[in-house]
């Protein structure tokens, strides 16, 4: 109920203030547009039109603030292109004429006028009838005692007298009161929808383009970081082992003739080194995309990952669905990197890993009882995870105060 009342109050305020704003907006913009078009052939109309567009921009900014109050969340403001560098005074003066959003502001300032009238009239009518009907017992006895006054029930032939008038008017008032939460927000939604379409649609599209651009840049950065890390791991691990293995085999080859027993020992060491290299290569490949993930899905892959962690892991996977490969790979990568960081840096005795689906998002939560201090600043391991999640429109939340505990939450869209 409180939310319904807040919604009704916000809609009422929006409708009642809409007309006082629409009247000067309509008058100034129509006058400016007419004067500008009438004198545009003499070049005087260009600065008049530019000034009119600036006035429209001011009214549009007021409307965007009203939309934010109505919806309860910020409304994007489009970027108005500045004049070119080094532009002259006249070019700077007429710069508003070159922006499409400025003309949309002007269009809104003009066509919103009839919608504001309708919204204002409907809102005032509904509130007036509702209040007057419910309060009729307070003032109705005065009206009933006026000579020659006939109530609506009497005029309609339903009945006459104070009681009939009271019942009839309170019934109408109750009907209008019950329909207030539907009618007033409904007419407000039409006016607000028009404003959103003209005043914030371009801005929302610009924000989406920026998000996609940032996501692409984050994906490139994450991929480049992963490749550099893989190259470093291969160089420092398997590559060095293979170089050492080649030297050992060359030594065994030289020993075969003069010291077969020593050659046999060298070959045994080489076989051991080969097995260690294979194990290291398997570990590296698991960090990329293990076969169990592509064959059986996230639940078994995360279970295998938890089983290999040197810190005990309490696993809680509440979804066994299969998801797109990019989603599964991202969730697995975040889990693998987080568990690796816990094993290396947290000094934790226990960690938890849970995976749940809520709506169209997968939520991966990883916590530990270690020393804390983890953050997503550039140059730290978690920054790469944040970039990888941004590449798929996901988010990373890290809570890790000094002294612990640490909680890492990753949300990945999966719908």
Image (spheres, helix red, strand yellow):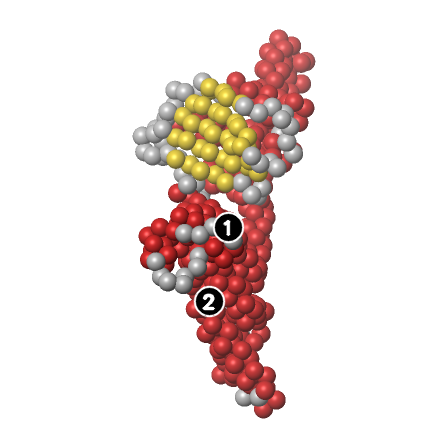
The quadrant of the rendering that contains the C terminus is top right
Q: Residue at x 53, y 60 (%)?
A: 191
Mark 2 neighbour density, 10 Å: few (under 14) some (14–19) many (20 or more): many
21 vs 376: above or below: below
| Label of residue 19 in the image | 2
Residue 299, how many percent across, how many down?
A: 58, 23
Please name whichever residue, 52 or 260, is drawn nearer the observer in this view of the structure.
52
| Secondary structure category for the residue under label 1 | loop
Mark 1 neighbour density, 10 Å: few (under 14) some (14–19) many (20 or more): few
Residue 14: tell me if it is visible.
Answer: no
Residue 35, how many percent across, how many down?
A: 54, 85
Please name whichever residue, 399 or 221, is drawn nearer the observer in this view of the structure.
399
Q: In front of the other: label 2 or label 1?
A: 1
Tell me the distance, in whole angstroms, between the alpha carbons under discs 2 and 1: 39 Å
Please name whichever residue, 144 or 55, is drawn nearer the observer in this view of the structure.
144
Residue at mark 1: 158
Q: Residue at x 49, y 57 (%)?
A: 155
137 vs 146: above or below: above
181 vs 115: above or below: above
Residue 128, how many percent across, how many down?
A: 42, 57
The quadrant of the rendering that contains the N terminus is top left
Residue 11: quarter of image: bottom left
| Label of residue 362 in the image | none
Q: Are marks 2 and 1 in contact (CB under 8 Å)?
A: no
Q: Residue at x 43, y 23 (%)?
A: 351
Residue 243: quarter of image: top right
């Amino acid at each position: 109920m409180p939310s319904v009342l807040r919604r009704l109050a916000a809609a009422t305020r929006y409708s009642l203030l809409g007309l006082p704003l629409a009247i000067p907006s309509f008058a100034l913009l129509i006058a400016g547009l007419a004067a500008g078009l009438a004198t545009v052939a003499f070049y005087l109309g260009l600065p008049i039109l530019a000034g009119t567009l600036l006035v429209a921009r001011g009214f549009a900014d007021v409307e965007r603030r009203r939309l934010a109050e109505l919806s309860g969340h910020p409304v994007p403001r489009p970027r108005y292109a500045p004049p070119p560098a080094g532009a002259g005074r006249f070019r700077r003066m007429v710069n508003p004429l070159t922006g499409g959003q400025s003309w949309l502001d002007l269009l809104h300032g003009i066509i919103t006028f009839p919608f504001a009238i309708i919204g204002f009239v409907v809102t005032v009518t509904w509130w007036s009838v509702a209040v007057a009907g419910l309060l009729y017992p307070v003032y109705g006895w005065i009206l009933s005692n006026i000579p020659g006054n006939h109530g609506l029930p009497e005029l309609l032939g339903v009945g006459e007298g104070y009681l009939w008038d009271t019942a009839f008017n309170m019934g109408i008032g109750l009907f209008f009161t019950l329909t207030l939460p539907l009618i007033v927000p409904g007419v407000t939604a039409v006016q607000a929808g028009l404003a959103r379409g003209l005043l914030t649609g371009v801005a929302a599209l610009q924000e989406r383009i920026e998000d996609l651009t940032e996501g692409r840049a984050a994906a490139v950065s994450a991929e480049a970081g992963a490749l550099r890390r893989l190259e470093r791991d291969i160089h420092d691990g398997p590559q060095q082992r293979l170089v050492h293995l080649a030297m050992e085999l060359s030594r065994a080859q030289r020993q075969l003739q003069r010291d077969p027993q020593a050659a046999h020992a060298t070959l045994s060491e080489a076989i051991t080194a080969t097995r260690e290299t294979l194990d290291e290569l398997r570990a590296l490949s698991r960090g990329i995309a293990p076969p169990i993930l592509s064959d059986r899905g996230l639940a078994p892959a995360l279970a295998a990952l938890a089983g290999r962690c040197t810190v005990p892991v309490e696993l809680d996977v509440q979804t066994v669905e299969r998801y797109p490969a990019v989603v599964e790979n991202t969730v697995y990568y975040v889990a693998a990197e987080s568990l690796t960081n816990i094993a290396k840096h947290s000094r934790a005795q226990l960690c938890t890993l849970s995976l749940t689906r809520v709506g169209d998002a997968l939520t991966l939560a990883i916590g530990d009882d270690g020393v804390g201090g983890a953050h997503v600043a550039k140059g730290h391991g978690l920054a790469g995870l944040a970039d990888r999640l941004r590449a798929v429109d996901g988010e990373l939340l890290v809570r890790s105060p000094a002294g612990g505990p640490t909680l890492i939450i990753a949300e990945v869209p999966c719908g």
